[in-house]
Amino acid sequence: QVQLVESGGGLVQAGGSLRLSCAASGRAFSTSALGWFRQAPGKEREFVGAITWNGGSTYYADAVKGRFTISRDNAKNTVYLQMNSLKPEDTAVYYCAAGAWRTIVAAPSDIAYWGQGTQVTVSS
């Protein structure tokens, strides 16, 4: 099993940056793909990006490509989401999730491990 705890959210002005962290516990972390998702008020949860178990590959939603970067440090059991050039439409609760790559990218409803989320608010 994997337990996930996000941190680093907050209030930032448009154009600013934030770095979210997702600290994990559990032996399966180092062999799991990790994903970031977000949910804005009144909207469905949406995929933001994902990283493979060894950090060798990443994949991003078009809405964040070129602005957000996912990385991971398996020695620290932590995955990061660096968010630059933030826009008001990036305002949401951000969640990290762990599982198989295919599940995270193509079948998120089947993801078993989720964090509790961290709020990101971007003011205009």
Image: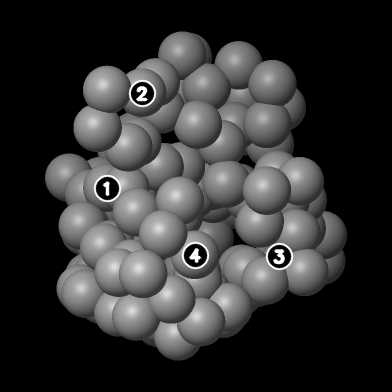
Q: Which amino acid does label 1 sit on?
A: Val
- Sequence-first disc among 3 and 2: 2
Residue 24, x across and y down, in percent:
31, 61
Residue 61, x across and y down, in percent:
70, 44
Q: Which amino acid does label 2 sit on?
A: Lys
- Sequence-first disc among 2 and 1: 2
Label count reads 4
Kindly state the secondary structure of the residue where label 2 is placed. Answer: loop
| Rendered residue at 41%/27% (across/down) | 45
- Sequence-first disc among 4 and 2: 2
Task: Give the CA separation, mark 1 to mark 4.
Answer: 14 Å
Q: Which amino acid does label 4 sit on?
A: Lys
The residue at which mark 1 appears reads as 93
Question: Taking 7 as reference, is 14 left or right?
Answer: right
- Sequence-first disc among 3 and 1: 3
The quadrant in which residue 105 appears is top right
Q: Which amino acid does label 3 sit on?
A: Asn
